[in-house]
Amino acid sequence: MPGSSGRVGSAAPAYGSGRSSSGGPSYGAPSSRSSGDGDWPPRGGGPGGPGGPPPAGRPYKGKRKPKWGRIALVVGAVLIVAGIIAGISLYGYANGLNDDLKRTDAFSEITNGRPAKTVDGALNVLLVGSDSRDPDAAKDTTNAWRADTLILMHIPADHKSAQLISIPRDLWVNIPSANDAACDSGSRAKINAAFAFGGLPRAVRTVECMTDVHLDHVLAIDFGGFKEVTDALGGVDLKVDQSITSIHKPHRKFVKGTMHMNGEQALDWIRQRKQFPRGDFDRMRHQQEFLKALMDKAASGGTLSNPSKLNDFLKSVTKAVTADQDFSLTDMAVQFRSLRGENLTFITSPNKGSETISGQSVVVADRDKALVLYKAVASDKMTEWMTANKS
């Protein structure tokens, strides 16, 4: 299983040859099966899935108010906590933290007898930023679960580095009609619509279909946790690449240069997108910069040498994170203790930028480049991919 393409159910490659369980790629322009309205709203099927109206409650809408980059801390929860705990050899303490983690069945209906994943070998983790602390919301209310950002984190078998692939929330993909449905079922929409159709498991299924990469674990984080963890570290220093005024109250001023930010300020900064020339893409870059700053601060001597500060940090992380049923913090602590900010490579899922499809502004994948990237992830050959794609 480690590092393999690890098809789940009837998952199949979404790129290149366009093969899936019954034909048809998951990316690109609307398929030849599109109705006159361009596959949106989805066709056929029952409520709550592509192919039927969204479930009762707040409907999914294509454009949302700009959100913030909660995903950064999810990654920190995986890597920072692991390295710190192992470094100070508090394995028993780690066990207690592991027990404190909230759990969710992220692989509901798509496991098909999937065995528990160990940390030996390569590892693929889906990191999710959301507006809810409750990934286990009932199916009839899953439309309340929303994701701001998705990151596919690949950790090679040697556990000495990690590659984090940001998936734009507006990426135009095929969303399967059910958590256990064929990859070419359903119809196309923005990827974060998967949460409205079937909660976290549908998002997992969609990403696996899109990339043909087997996901071993899923971690989610909420708004409150983002602020608490940052504040537990005493804030972070972030580069402000242009002076702006926040579009959110209390309309903070961010001045070009390096600024020390607490949790509220950092949250506000990485929410901004409208003031920047590349919009969501600049916002993703700011999220990535925040992640590195957070990791480096957490691994610093000032955190490790202060028992009270370290405890506050670790407790805030476990309160903020929701993990899948098989995720083990103690295993992570042993295996990934050497990971630091300089060991991370940030990548954006290959795309051709924004286009208007079915009246929506969406991000269109670069299918050829994406095929090569995700094949490298699935086969644990990211070192070779990065050498060939140094830019």
Image: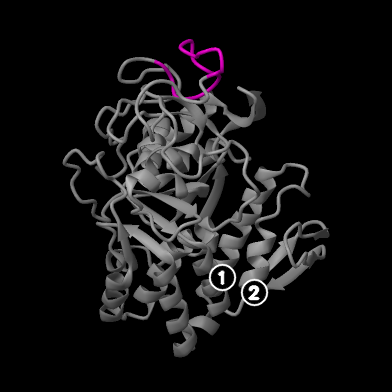
Residue 155 visible in this rendered orientation of the protein: no
In the figure, 338 relative to 29: above or below?
Answer: below
Magenta part of the chain: 24-38
Residue shown at the point (35%, 24%) measured from the top left: 45
Residue shown at the point (66%, 25%) measured from the top left: 356
Q: Which residue is mark 1?
A: 227
Type of secondary structure dominating the magenta stretch: loop
In the figure, 289 relative to 388: above or below?
Answer: below
Expressed as whole percent of the image width and height from the top left, the position of residue 107 reads: 28, 45
Q: Secondary structure at mark 1?
A: helix
Expressed as whole percent of the image width and height from the top left, the position of residue 268 reads: 67, 62
Residue farthest toward the top in the current orientation of the protein: 32
Going by the image, does 100 lie left or right of 152?
A: left
Per the image, is 36 magenta? yes
Q: Amino acid at mark 2?
A: Asn
Q: Which residue is mark 2?
A: 262
Expressed as whole percent of the image width and height from the top left, the position of residue 38 reads: 55, 18
Going by the image, does 222 lie left or right of 184?
A: right
Residue 293 visible in this rendered orientation of the protein: yes
The quarter in which the C terminus is drawn is: top right
Q: Amino acid at mark 1?
A: Lys
Residue farthest toward the front in the current orientation of the protein: 56
**Callouts 2 and 1 close, C-beta under 8 Å:** yes
Which tag, 2 or 1, sits closer to the chain's start? Answer: 1
